[in-house]
Structures are given as C-alpha cells and as structure tokens.
Image: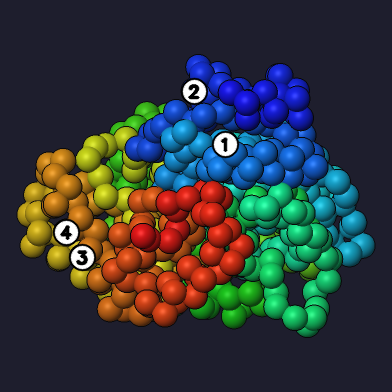
Amino acid sequence: MDLIDKLRAALGDAHVLTGSDCVRYASDWTGVYSAQPLAVVRPGNTAEVSAAVKLASTAGIPIVPVAGNTGLCGGTYAPDSLMISVERMNAIREIRPGARVAVIEAGVVLDAIHAAVEAHDLIFPLTFGARGSAMLGGALSTNAGGSNVVRYGSTRGLCLGLEVVLPSGEVLDLMSALHKDNSGYDLKDLFIGAEGTLGLITAATVKLFPRPAAYATAMVAVPALSDALTLLNRLQRQTGGAVEAFEYMSAPMIDGLLAQFPDMRAPFADRHDVNLMVEIGATAPRDATPGPDGSLPVVAHLETVLGEMLEDGTVLDAVVAQNEGQRAEMWRRRESVAEVTLKRHPFVNTDISVPLDAVEAFLTRIGERLQQIDPTADELAVAHLGDGNVHYIAYPTRDDPVLMDQILEAIEQVALDLGGSFSAEHGIGKSKLPSMQRRKDPVALDIMAQIKVALDPRELMNPGKVLPG
C-alpha cells in the first residue's frame, strides 16, 4: 500500500487504479491470458512514466507496459504487477509535412494518426484490423506489420527515432528525425519488437508518405498460389512498385466470413480456393487524373492486366472496385478475418513467415501434416502474401495440450524447413516462449539474455515475456 500511496501522490488518485477498476486491463484481446494486476497507472507524460517506473523499481514490483491491449500472445499478462498504461499519452506533438515526419506519443490510436496526417495530404501507412484501438506504442513494441508491408515495410522501417523510459526510470532520448546517423549502435532497434522487456516506449518519430490520389482495388481468384506470385510480380513491374496490399484468403476463410456476417457478400459468384485482395496506390497525376469518361488510369491499367491474365488462364475471376463503397467492402472482408479465426475453440493460432515463393509449399505441407496428426482437424489460412506472412489456424478435434503442442511444433517445423520463421508480426509474449526455446538460435538467445540483464538486471520490466527461462 505504501507504493500505491506514492503512485497516487505522483500521478493523482484518478490515475492509479486498483481492484475492480483494473478489470478492463486484466485480459488481452484473446482472453487466453487473464490476471489481476497490483494496480494500473495512467501517466500523462514521460516524466510521470519515469516517476512510476522508479517507484516500482525501488519497491521491487514487476512493471508491465500496456497500450491498446490488442495483442494476441499474452504480452500484457501482469499478475501482481504494476501495469503502466500509455493511453493518456495521446498527443501528436508535431507534424512536419516538408520532412514527412511526425512526432507521436505512444498512446495515440492508429486511426487518429491516419486522420491527423491525412489533413496534410500524407499517410502513416501502418494499418491492420485493430487500427481503431491499437496504439503506436504497442505497434512499436511488437514491430507490427499489417497489410501495407509490401510497399512501406513493417513498423521498424517506419520509425526514425524513439523516446524510452528505461527500467531504471532514466529517459533515453533517441528522438532523431535523421535518415542517416552512423554514430554508434542503432539503439532504437533494440526497443522496437522487444515488447517492453527492455524499456517502455513513450514516443516516436515516424515516417510519413504522400497520400495516394487514387486507388485501384480488386478481388482476384487464381488457380494456385504460384499464379498469385506471377500476378504480384507483374503488377509490381508495371506499376513501379505501387502495390500497397496483396492479401490471401482461403476458401474456408471466405466461408467463415459469410457464415459469421450475414450481410457480407461473397467476393465472386463462384467459390474459389485462392482469393486475393489487391490494391495499388497511385500518387502520380498521370495515374490518378480521371479521363474524359471519368475513368481512372490506375484502375484501367489494373483492369487491363487482369483481363490479359483472364485470357491466358492465370486468373480465374476478378472484380475491380468501381467506387469507394466497393473498395470499403473488400477491405471489410479482409479486416474481419480475426473475428472468425478466434471464434471457434480450441484453436492453434500461428503467425509464421516464409519466402514469398514458399507460401504454397507451406500450406500444402502443413495441410498434409495436420491430417496425419489429427485427421478430422480443420484449418483456416489468411496471408499478407506480398511479404510471406501467413496466419495459419488449426482447429484440433479436442482440447488436449499435448495434441495442440504437437500441431504447433509441426507448423513451426514446416515453416523452418522452408527457410521461414515461427513469428512474423504478433510478437512473442508468453505464448511463443516454448517456440523461442526450441527454435531460436542458442547464441542469439544468449546475446538477448545478456542485453536484458545489462538493461534490466533485476528483471522487473515485463518479466516472463520474449525470453524463455
């Protein structure tokens, strides 16, 4: 109680929550990991974060950072810990349109960033289904990916500078807007993707990009995923790398969407095994200026490419959005898949990545392997196909931890056999600790552990996450 009193004195009674007031923080989005924290504090600025960390550190209390709490791997599991929420740190400190950068606090929701920079005819391209509640701090802490990685890169690639409160309470100022700085180690990359185990991110300097003046968006069915790669490479070549999204949904995933959302229309008149959502963003006036008939050159170009591929059989069907309503319908279909994947229990939810030309082999091999392990199990798949990130979900016939771990091991092994990784964009948290133990290079694990001890010798900052043991 002495710690709680000191926190209230530092932050104010209204921003130190205990007991039942902590309920909404006690479980992540999946509901798999739930625990009662000692307290939740809501600092309003970096100095208050520093004060809270120092008080917890002095008391020897574990510290668990939390942003939008939309994680899928138990990264905010906080039994008897002090949770530090960045939700009140929600200011966009600065937008510099000329330099195409913004200085943004960790508690700003992605949708709010999108709206703020759009007023300057710019975009912050990080986007995914939880963008209405996910915050920048969480995206940085997990190195989130999303649907636009194929053009803009993951969160790490979008970040120029960071402000971090270290486990000691010291504030590390790395808030550079430089694109080049060779003055020693690039420390910011230590904290991006570290899930709060090395420090608490309070703000970042991020890159902005010109807002496309027009989009060409389509649903495309192809005979096989190898044909999808042919389509992607052709579009990239003919648009100068303007493909913004290239998303795959399996036939069972489409079935699940239509069953769960009765108002949702099927993408095509016929059912297809390989369903793609493709989007091209045009910034050049020559591609985005309507012609005399009102048609957009970028849309006409996409229609031409798809028409040629329909003729040679590498595309089976295609529907090109003719207005913003049809485009929104296509995006809604893609962004609703998370609600389908986690509705059915038990499940094994994975987030693997493989080289682009190995996605088809992965899905074929793991489908065969799943049937060997559990012949009546079901599967769903959705992928950011443009960057090789596959979200593969298996539904075992029974809630048996041994069976589920056997399935998980098989998924990991198939991915690694193809030169892939068992984790792409969701982070490690608690759920992937066994995978880290058995799959990560031991030397890499040892180096990570040394870094953890160097920065957090008492192991108080988000303990029990990312590093096994």
Q: What residue type is labelled 3?
A: Ala
The residue where tag 2 is placed is: 23
Identify the residue position indicated by label 4 in the image: 406
Q: How far apart, in angstroms, are the residues tagged by discs 1 and 3?
A: 35 Å
Callout 2: 10 Å neighbours few (<14), some, many (20+)?
some
Query: For this rendering, which residue is in front, 445 or 408?
Result: 445
Three-letter amino acid code of the residue under disc 2: Val
Image quadrant containing the N terminus: top right
Instruction: For marks 2 and 1, give the CA distance.
Output: 12 Å
> In terms of sequence position, does the residue under pointer 3 or pointer 2 come before the other?
2
Count how many numbered circles sit on residues in the image: 4
Q: How crowded is mark 1: few (under 14 residues within 10 Å), some or many (20 or more)?
A: many
Specify whether 117 is left or right of 149: right
Q: Is mark 1 on a helix, strand or loop?
A: strand
Is 301 positioned to the left or the right of 206 in the image? left
> In the rendered structure, which amino acid carries the disc numbered 1?
Met
